[in-house]
Image (cartoon, grey):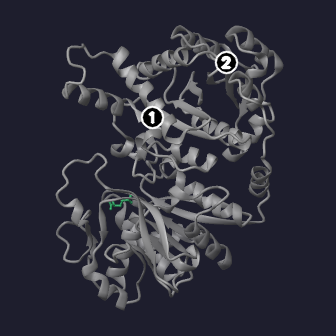
Amino acid sequence: MTKYIFITGGVVSSLGKGILAASLGRLLVSKGYKVSIQKFDPYINVDPGTMSPFQHGEVFVCDDGAETDLDLGHYERFINTDLSQINNVTSGSVYQTVINKERRGEYLGATVQMIPHITGEIKSRLIQATKKDNPDILIAEIGGTIGDIESLPFIEAIRQFRTEIGHGNSMSIHVTLLPYLPTSGELKTKPSQHSVNVLRSYGIQPEMLVLRTQVPIGKNEKDKLALFCSVNKDCVIECKDMNTIYEVPIYLENQGITKEILKILNLEDREAKLADWEELIYAIKHPKKEATIGLVGKYTELNDAYISVVESLKHAGFKNSAKINIKWIASDNITTYKEAEEILSDVDGILVPGGFGTRGIEGKLKVIKYARENNVPYLGLCLGMQCAVIEFARNVAGLNNANSTEFDKTTEYKVVDLMEEQKNILGYGATMRLGSYPCKITPNTKAHQAYQADIINERHRHRFEFNNEYKEILTQKGLVISGTSPDGLLAEIVEIPKNDWFVACQFHPEFKSRPQNPHPLFLGFIDAVLNQK
Ligand code: GLN
């Protein structure tokens, strides 16, 4: 029978509940348990796919094409498992299911209500996630902060669910913040006490507290919280700010967190096999080299917008004992080639990630021209490939003002155009080319060298594509198409062989990189960067 861990947060948002869920997952896996993780997001959007990255950070894409919360990226990276649509539940998707059922007459005669219908659907999602992966332990993270109106149905569903599955089969972990007052040198416990009181008022007594803090928590504060919140003293766990998120599992385990969890869940404690994770931390903490990558995008004010890209760069760095620094460059600040030259003069590699819309495109094209002409290693992801094609068409193939029809519908040279299957689609939600598709790699290319494989599978999220009408002229001028869909019709990877590393792909390799298994294209890119240094 699956056991359940429910993680809620209090006092403030952005406490790192996702990293905590992922870290617990990692630790329980290291003790030989099969773990799955599910995120519940209280917003009404059916999925985050229609939200601006400024609102909610990156949209993480799973193999099955689910557009999900960025926490799923942490989960996949920490527990090294591919997740899917059922691992991300939103209020919007719950309401949508219930309202569709009502319209089909499935509740005929009944008044459809928050309890039991919405809460029932939430519980059914827990069961669906359990049935899909059949884990020993399912960790469910509830987004938002305790006390929010939005998350109430989720909390109520958990309360019911916990009662239904019986004592000893689930636990509640509440994550809060202990604010530090530098003037008096004190950590304050009161906001956490109040937050636990609110959780209890909903019928949930947490078995464990995880406390985010800037400074170590003294025994006094821990004992006080244990007493006021009715939590066992050994279950008051400190979670200090760490230099790297990958250190969090070890930091928690050093306090015996999984021993306590397994006791509460009536599961046997086992030896944690963490040697490989400790090796990873050692590599992270003892870099022998350093390199700076210019990350050129339009959402650079919010680093979370590119979180998987940043993590993937770091993973490739770990493997090379190299520290990767990111220089964030807002593409709309670059209006001339000279500005691009200046801003890029101190970077060792350039990455243009995915994106949507016209803002910042001309800046990206100047950056790519700089990378191409100066043989600076370049990695383009999705929009970063489309822009590389546009730049090459304009400045190498002489197709003046070549463009993507996403940015200029009237351009004479539509080198990037809407995919055929996209032309009749009207709505925006979950309608892109999404999820994992196979790609055939051309022998004797940088891509082939990197992957060491003829067929690979990568995750996609786009509407536009390389226009094959320009294949001949662009390839004659030296662009190589090094990856295509198996039928040869969609260009998936392009490269410029003349350069040390100029590779751009239509898919999103960043969603498949893992700390202990960096993605081949990121490795190839970072290798080239370090070789040039
Ligand atoms: N806007 C482009 C498209 O829809 C690129 C998408 C992306 O970078 N994810 O094709």
Q: Compared to 183, does 60 lie above or below?
A: below
Q: Residues within 10 Å of mark 2 (few under 14, many from 20)?
A: many
Residue at image mark 1: 128
Check disc 2 and report the residue beneath it: 207
Residue lying at the far front of the rendered structure = 1
Residue 411, percent from left and from top:
20, 72
Q: Amino acid at mark 1?
A: Gln
Which is nearer the N-term, disc 2 or disc 1? 1
| Rendered image: mark on residue 318 | none
Q: Is residue 174 above or below residue 32?
A: above
Q: Residue at horizontal 70%, vertical 29%?
A: 213
Q: Are marks 2 and 1 in contact (CB under 8 Å)?
A: no
| Other-residue count near label 1 (Cα within 10 Å), few / some / many at <14 / 14–19 / ≥20 | some
Camera-near label (2 vs 1) is 1
**Camera-side residue of 375 and 428:** 428
Q: Secondary structure at mark 2?
A: loop
Of 90 and 145, nearer the camera is: 90
Visible in this render: residue 518?
yes
Viewer can see residue 336: no
* Image quadrant in which you'd find residue 215: top right
In the rendered image, residue 52, in percent from the top left (x then y), is placed at 37, 45
- Ligand 1 resides in the quarter of the picture at bottom left
The residue carrying mark 1 has its beta carbon less than 8 Å from ligand 1: no
Q: Secondary structure at mark 1?
A: helix
